[in-house]
Image (cartoon, helix red, strand yellow):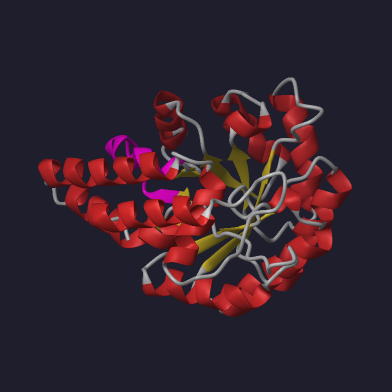
C-alpha cells in the first residue's frame, strides 16, 4: 500500500495548558503554520507529540482535532503505538473512523520482541483494526530497545500486514536505510527520521522525511532539498551545516523541552512537556531561540 508521499512531514508537539491538560485550541495555529511553511503532513502523537505520556482518550482527541483542521490540506499519520495490543488497535480503529490518512506504531518497549516474527505478531492485529489505512512501522531503536533488522521485516511484512506501506526510519544506520529504499525496486515508503542528517539521506535517495524541527525550520530544509536537487553541492553543504548547528544548539538541553521552547519563541504556545520531562528555564529558552535566529534556522 505504498503512498509515494514526498516532502516534509512534521512531528508536532502536543499542546498543554498551564495545569497540564490538553490545550487543543493551539493545534489550529500549529496546523496553519505547517501549511504556510509547505509541510505536507503531520505525524501526530509520536515521540515529539508525547504520545506515550497521553491517555487513550487524549490521544484520540488530539488525532481527531488534527484530522479536522487538516481538512485534506495535510496528510495526517496517527501514531497508535502502545505496549498493549487492544489499546493500540482501539487507537488505530479510531484514527480510521476519524478520517486519518495513515497510522504508525513503534515496537512494544517493555516486553520487547526478540525477532521480526514476534514484532509482526504484535503489529498485525493493530494494523488490522484500520485495514483501509496505510500502516508504517516506526523504527526508533534508541527509544524502544528493539534493534531489529529492517530488511527481514520488509520481506515478511506484507504477508502479515496487507496494509503495510513502509517505515519511519529513525536510526543512524544509513547503509540499512539505503537498502530499505532499494528493497524490491522501491516497493515501500521509507521516511527518513533524523533531521540533522538530511543531506546524507538525500545522497542515498531519500524523498520523504518525518521530523520535529520541521515544525519551525521547514523553509531551511526546503532550501537544502532544492540546493541538492539543483546539484549545488557547496550550498547544500552550507545549509546542512546550519541544520546541524541548529540541532546542536537544540540538544544543549533535552530535545523535546527545547523544541517546545522554540515553538513558544515563534509564537505557538504549546506549553511545557509532561513529567518526568521538565521545561527549559526562561534564560535557557531565550539563549536557544536567539541562537536559532542567529543561525537563520527560524
Quarter of the rendering containing residue 154: top right
Residue 37 x, y percent position in the rendering? 36, 69
As drawn, is 171 to the left or to the right of 63?
Answer: left
Q: Hey, which quadrant is residue 196 in on the image?
A: top left
Residue occupying the point 67% across, 27% down? 146
Q: Above or below — where is 34 with respect to 48?
A: below
Position of 118 compared to 182: left or right? right
Is residue 296 shown to the viewer in this render?
A: no
Asked whether residue 245 is in view, the answer is yes
- Judged left or right of residue 150, residue 123 is right
Residue under the point 84% across and 44% down: 85
- Image quadrant containing the C terminus: bottom left
Q: Residue at x 48, y 63 (%)?
A: 263
Identity of the residue furthest to the top in this view: 114
The residue that appears at 31% across and 35% down in the rendered structure is 200
Q: Where residue 240 sits in the image (x, y, percent)?
A: 25, 43
Is 197 magenta? The answer is: yes
**Percent of width and height locating residue 141:** 60, 29
Count the marks: 0
> In the shown orientation, is residue 192 left or right of residue 227?
right
Q: Nearer the viewer, residue 54 or 210?
A: 54
Question: Percent position (x, y) of residue 168?
Answer: 54, 43
The residue lying toward the viewer, choosing from 230 and 259, is 259
Q: Is residue 258 magenta?
A: no
Q: Which residue of the protein is positioned furthest toward the front in this rendering?
A: 283
Which residue range is magenta in the image?
Answer: 194-209
- The correct choice, above or below, for 196 with respect to 96 in the image is above
Residue 118, located in which quarter of the rendered image? top right
Amino acid at each position: 500500500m505504498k503512498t509515494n508521499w514526498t516532502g516534509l512531514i512534521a512531528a508536532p508537539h502536543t499542546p498543554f495548558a498551564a495545569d497540564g491538560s490538553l490545550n487543543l485550541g493551539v493545534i489550529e495555529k500549529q496546523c496553519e503554520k505547517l501549511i504556510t511553511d509547505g509541510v505536507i503532513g503531520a505525524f501526530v502523537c509520536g515521540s515529539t507529540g508525547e504520545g506515550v505520556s497521553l491517555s487513550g482518550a487524549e490521544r484520540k482527541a488530539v488525532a481527531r482535532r488534527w484530522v479536522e483542521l487538516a481538512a485534506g490540506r495535510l496528510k495526517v499519520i496517527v501514531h497508535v503505538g502502545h505496549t498493549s495490543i487492544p489499546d493500540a488497535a482501539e487507537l488505530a480503529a479510531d484514527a480510521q473512523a476519524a478520517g486519518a490518512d495513515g497510522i504508525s506504531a513503534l515496537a512494544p518497549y517493555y516486553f520487547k520482541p526478540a525477532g521480526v516474527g514476534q514484532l509482526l505478531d504484535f503489529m498485525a492485529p493493530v494494523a488490522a483494526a484500520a485495514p483501509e489505512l496505510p500502516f508504517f512501522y516506526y523504527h526508533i531503536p534508541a527509544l524502544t530497545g528493539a534493534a531489529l533488522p529492517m530488511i527481514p521485516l520488509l520481506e515478511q511484512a506484507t504477508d502479515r500486514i496487507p496494509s503495510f506501506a513502509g517505515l519511519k526510519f529513525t536510526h543512524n544506520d544509513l547503509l540499512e536505510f539505503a537498502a530499505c529504499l532499494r528493497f524490491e525496486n522501491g516497493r515501500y515508503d521509507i521516511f527518513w527520521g533524523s533531521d540533522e542528517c538530511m543531506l546524507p539521506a538525500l545522497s542515498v535517495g531519500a524523498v520523504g522525511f518525518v521530523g520535529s524541527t520541521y515544525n519551525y525550520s521547514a523553509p531551511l530544509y526546503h532550501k537544502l532539498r532544492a540546493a541538492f536537487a539543483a546539484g549545488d553541492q557547496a550550498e547544500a553543504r552550507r545549509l546542512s551545516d546550519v541544520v546541524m548547528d541548529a540541532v546542536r544548539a537544540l540538544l544543549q538541553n533535552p530535545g523535546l523541552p527545547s523544541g517546545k521552547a522554540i515553538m513558544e519563541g515563534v509564537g505557538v504556545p504549546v506549553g511545557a512537556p509532561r513529567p518526568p520531562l521538565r521545561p527549559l528555564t526562561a534564560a535557557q529558552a531565550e539563549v536557544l531561540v536567539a541562537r536559532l535566529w542567529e543561525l537563520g534556522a527560524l
